[in-house]
Image: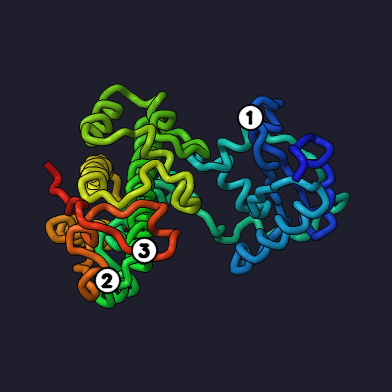
Amino acid sequence: MAGPDLGAARRAADELVSAGVGTVLLFGSLARGDTATPGDIDLVAIYDDLGDYGGRAACRAELQRRARAVSGCPVDVIVTDAPEWATRTTGVPCSIEALIAEDAITLADIDQHGEIDWDKDIGMPATPAAELQERFANLADAVLDLTANLVPGTEEARAAAAGDLSEHTATELRRFAKACSAAHMVFESSAKIMLILTAGAPPPREHRIPTLLATQPQWVSEAFEAAARNIDLIKLSDWHQAQHYAGSWPHDEFDDTYLRRHASAAIGIATFSAEQCQHRELDADLMRRFDVRMGNCQAALTGSLRAAYRNRTAGTVTAAEATRPRTLSEATSPPVLRGAGGRGPVGLG
């Protein structure tokens, strides 16, 4: 695909208007004239009225497909409508829409707009309190994902019980990457919650934890540093996209100590963020479910993080070889005969 430029962005915007969008905005690096860090073409597709927002996801997928086809560039489209955009940009200063509006450029607009129900309920949070609650729900979901990937799943356990080293290694490494990515998401969600709480500011579309902390009060940064004292926050941020691309994993073997440290750090920073939200009148059931998920996550860390591996017939895989950290190359290569001499999983230390 070609690199993004204003010409490609305008072609994409015109295509969205032809698909029924009322107004198309350009934001992000291209709108700011930042050509040093080329990325996607970032567009906001503002319909006159989307109705009940039920088809938003399918609409976004179709608009992105059409925009990419005519522009020859990667395109990311945010789909909204006039009532929602107006509410989010003017009434929710901590929303992503309020942040986007600061440097957005109108690329296309239809000549005549249709009927708009300005009084309807919008699909996204309509108040700062509702925005904070949604961010906290994201944190609770990240804790749930972390817990789910701390313990072996069905396929991994089946491969271990069958003595299938290659499949066991592949599924175990995939779970390891997902768990590390979930730990990153716990930190990212917590950092964005703190931005809303301390500054009432919209969190940027950013995934690097140090960058999210750069403008925060010192006491917030110190809390994050304390929680992350046994891990590297810069490398943690690398897990955001890396979990989808095995060759770019920051850590390419299942490491019990590494995983426990990152999960423990995530639990620590989630606890801190929840404490800051205690008196913010968040939904009581959401807080209850968060507490349950935190308890489950802590309980998962008290047990084994690996499936018990059944040795095959003599001369195939030794016990030491079966329990040592598995590497990425082993996960993607055929099973081979290996000698003893590996080491077993270690404790947190």
Circle nearer the viewer, 3 or 2? 3
Report which residue position mark 1 lands on: 37
- Work out whether mark 2 precedes mark 1 in sequence or the reverse, and give the earlier one: 1
Question: Where, by quadrant of the figure, is residue 170 drawn?
Answer: bottom left
Query: Could you give the CA–CA distance between mark 1 and mark 3, rounded to whole angstroms?
Result: 44 Å
Callout 1 amino acid: Thr
Q: Nearer the viewer, mark 1 or mark 3?
A: 3
Residue 1 shows which numbered tag?
A: none
Residue, disc 3: 336
Place of residue 2 in the rendered image (x, y in percent of width and height, measured from the top left): 77, 41
Q: CA distance from mark 2 to mark 1?
A: 45 Å
Above or below 267: residue 289 = below
Q: Residue at x 67, y 54 (%)?
A: 81
N-term mark: 3 or 2 = 2
Task: Determine whether the residue tagged by mark 3 lies in a helix, strand or loop.
Answer: loop
Residue highlighted by disc 2: 160
Q: How is the image coloured?
A: rainbow
Dot 1 and dot 3 residues touching (CB under 8 Å) = no
Which amino acid, mark 2?
Answer: Ala
* Residue drawn where x is 70% and y is 47% of the image: 74
- Circle 2 sits in a helix, a strand or a loop, which is it? helix
